[in-house]
Image (tube, rainbow, N blue to C red):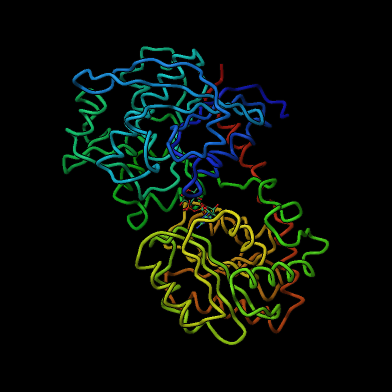
Amino acid sequence: MADTPRRSIAFIGSECYPFVKTGGLGDVMYALPKALVAQNCDVRVLVPKYACIPQKYKDLMVYRGSFDMDLCSDGKRYFVGIMEYVWDGVVYDFIENEEFFGWGKPYTDLVVDIPKYCFFCKAALSALLYMNWIPDIVHCHDWQAGLVPVYMRTLLNGTALGKSRAIFTIHNLRFQGIHSKEHIQYWTGLPDEVFGLPYIGQSNGNANMLKGGITFADLVTTVSNTYAQEIQTGFYGENLDAHLRYHAYKLGGIVNGIDTNQWNPATDKHLAVNYDASNVHENKKKDKLALQERLGLNQDEGKFVIGLVSRLTNQKGLDLVNSIIPQVMDEHTQIVVLGTGDAEYENSFRYYENAYKGNMASCIMYDESLAHSIYAGCDAFLVPSLFEPCGLTQLTAMRYGTVPIVRETGGLKDTVAPYNEFTNEGNGFTFDHYSAWLLLDAINRAKTVYFTEPERWKQMVDRDMAKDVSWDLSAQIYKDMYLSLTQW
Ligand code: ADP
Ligand code: GLC
């Protein structure tokens, strides 16, 4: 346990592994609180109690209390239940309300999601007040929790939470929670002034929940240094670059880690064969053969197998991937894709699976266990994103000795040092501009080292496995930030 002073933190966000996860936000909401406990923090995580949370977790929750809360501008009141589960030193409080969370998955469309997360922001804070658990820091994440700092500094400013500090972390600036001012004002009951341009209003008359988080938080962070800089530019700024530049004095980047116990090739129960740094070169081949068998690929440990595990959206650089698959596929290469998302990508990957039977597998599904087998069984791992706030898959790939091929953007740039053929250093193969030819070139450079300089390839695998991708360092940086805000 770190010997810095103890601080209490409420994490508020829309997903948390293993209860509910659609992407990296869920991973961070799980792994960072655990790492903060080791930094002498007292952490409570508040998430909605969605219907889709597996029953085995619901069975573990205990009733912590309930109350009625006013929400809308016409005074309409809503039930708020708190179901609690304590695990590994972290307290999870699930916010219950049948009307908002009693059906479906976390995200549907904005018509439904805006009222849902307006409710969630106020309900999470009201739950803290109800439990009389007043944290030093309220740390909220992404647009779904963007109104938390807004409520703290307006309607709830007179409560005990008025003294707590607010931190807002941007995991993905693309999603902002935008709707008409009237709609958001009705659902939140927030006063008129808040809807001005410097606060949560937009010039087109809409209101923006993520913008509210930026405006009212004491500090704003994002999940890598490079992304913190990028979002202040027009290309990456998603129309908020000017607002972010205005608030740049309180904006910084802290790179994500991964939970190295959850992702550990030496103990991973999903793998055919476990391995660590001492036997990776022999055992990883066995995981490759097992993966090929599982997916119906030609079994050959000599093939260069490239993996991709991703939400299938245009953020992830899939247009580049799609346009070069025919050039990548040769008799020495296989590609494995795991993901769900936009139909255009799902269908093109299905098409390629059929076109390259036996050497290309497209698993259009969400499957945690298969993801583990892919991280272990592949030689290289593709993350050619258009933008990437941090990216966790390249970190996991490195942890499993799988060499990343990434575009130099956001957290990919901050975590994957490019291979330098002169000094024999680096963790992976990188390219800068968003170009299919540069991606193809990076893949070809990787193949060349793999096939013509196998010793150097192995040394890169060794460097990747030795790299610290844990939360240890970044959790310390978060703790220092919490301390800097709470010098009492
Ligand atoms: P993002 O949050 O933008 O989706 P990240 O790289 O931060 O990207 O995190 C993605 C997380 O979701 C990783 O843990 C990855 O393994 C997981 N993941 C993505 N798609 C799938 C899938 N189809 N099946 C299993 N896990 C997936
Ligand atoms: C977002 C980003 C991803 C990041 C994750 C966790 O979903 O797209 O880059 O790793 O959040 O912070």
- Extreme residue toward the bottom, this view: 331
Residue 129 against residue 2 in the figure, above or below: above
Give the residue drawn at x 62%, y 70%: 380
Give percent across and percent down for residue 302: 70, 80
Residue 282, above or below 74: below
Q: Quadrant of the C terminus?
A: top right
Using the rendered view, name the quadrant where residue 322 is placed: bottom left
Instruction: Farthest residue to the right: give it.
Output: 278
- The tally of labels here is 0
User: Residue, x 44% and y 15% (percent of image)?
Assistant: 129
Front in this rendered view, residue 456 or 234: 456
* 100 relative to 136, above or below: below
Figure check: 394 above or below 191: below
Residue at 73% in and 71% down: 285
Q: Quadrant of residue 278?
A: bottom right
Q: Position of residue 2 (x, y in %)?
A: 71, 29
173 sits to left or right of 284 = left
Q: Would residue 470 appear left or right of 144 to someone viewing this image?
A: right
In the shown orientation, is residue 401 left or right of residue 140?
A: right
